[in-house]
Structure formats: structure tokens, C-alpha cells
Image: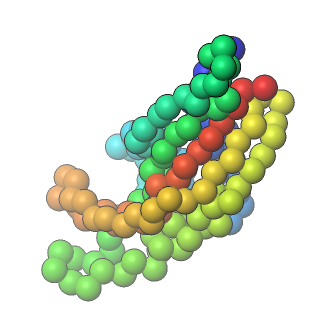
Amino acid sequence: MPNEETLAQDYLLDYLGSDATLQGLINGVWLRTVPVSAPMPAVKLDILSREDLMVINLFRVWADLTILVRGTAESKSGFGEAEDWSEVEAIGDQIDTLLHKHEDNTSAIQIHSFREESFSDETVEDGKLYLHSGGIYRVRAKAV
């Protein structure tokens, strides 16, 4: 049986990457690591936890994943100045529009997702300030 985690990752990369509204806000969707050469803003997916739901005879019902899905943009303000979160918040809002209460069935996977927590943060990398907005999503996936 195919690995539901990898199917879910591929599905999310394709699904988020094909949304015209989101694509108008970002320059790419990445799993785990955004390449240094990738232009910002971008969307990044990080698998936080994974567990299989099993029933009688070890029948696997689905893979139960928690995934941090966030938009990341370089701050246009200097350190110590009031940050403008509007760009990255628009990305986070579109992510939520796409993934909260989402269900789909493809030839490879049955999937549904919902947001468990909102997420916002800022990080400093190579002397640059990055803003993050998105959420932690519960994703349940079943290979078909």
C-alpha cells in the first residue's frame, strides 16, 4: 500500500501550488526547506507529527498528520520599526481559505484537512527579518 504521508505531501504541494490567488501572492510552495535561491514570499510545509489510525486486523484507516503550513515574507521594515504584516497575512488567509474544512478524492488519495491552530512568528536569518503567517493543520489521508 502506498505511503499516505508522501501522497499527502505531494497533494498539498500540487493543490497549493495550483491556486491562482495564492500564486499571485507567492513565488513557490516548498516542503521542509526553502532553497536559499528561492525568491520570497513563499509557502513552506513542515510535518510536525504523524500517526496511523489502525482498527481490527491492522486495517489502516488513514494517516493522521499535523502540518505547519505558513507563508513567509521578508520584512520590508528595518529592525525595531513597526512591521507591515499585510503581505504575509494575506498569504496566511489564503492558506486557511484553501485548507480549513477541505476535502478531496483523487485517483490516489482521499484527504481532508482543518486548522487546529493559527500560527505567526518572525525569524532572523542571515541578518534579514522574515515574517510568517499560517496555521497548524490536521490532515487525514487515505491511499486509494
Q: Which residue lies at the image location 45% right of the left edge and 66% below the top edge?
A: 118
Instruction: Where is residue 23? Give x, y as percent.
Output: 63, 59
Is 113 displayed left or right of 72 in the figure? right
Task: Pick the residue in front: 37 or 19.
Answer: 19
Q: Is residue 53 above or below residue 98?
A: above
Instruction: Name the colour scheme.
Output: rainbow
Taking the image as drawn, is residue 23 in sight?
Answer: no
Asked whether 130 or 113 is in front, the reply is: 113
Q: Position of residue 116 (x, y in %)?
A: 50, 59
Q: Residue at x 45, y 70 (%)?
A: 88
Vertical relation: 36 (above or below) 73: above
Position of 124 compared to 110: left or right? left
- Left or right: where does residue 33 sit relative to residue 108? left
Locate the C terminus and report the quarter of the image it occupies.
Answer: top right
Q: Residue at x 62, y 41 (%)?
A: 140
Answer whether residue 82 is visible to the viewer in this image: yes
Return the residue nearer the eye: 66 or 13.
66
Q: Nearer the viewer, residue 49 or 25?
A: 49
For the N terminus, the quadrant is: top right
Horizontal and vertical percent position of residue 114 = 60, 56
Within the image, what quadrant is residue 115 found in? bottom right
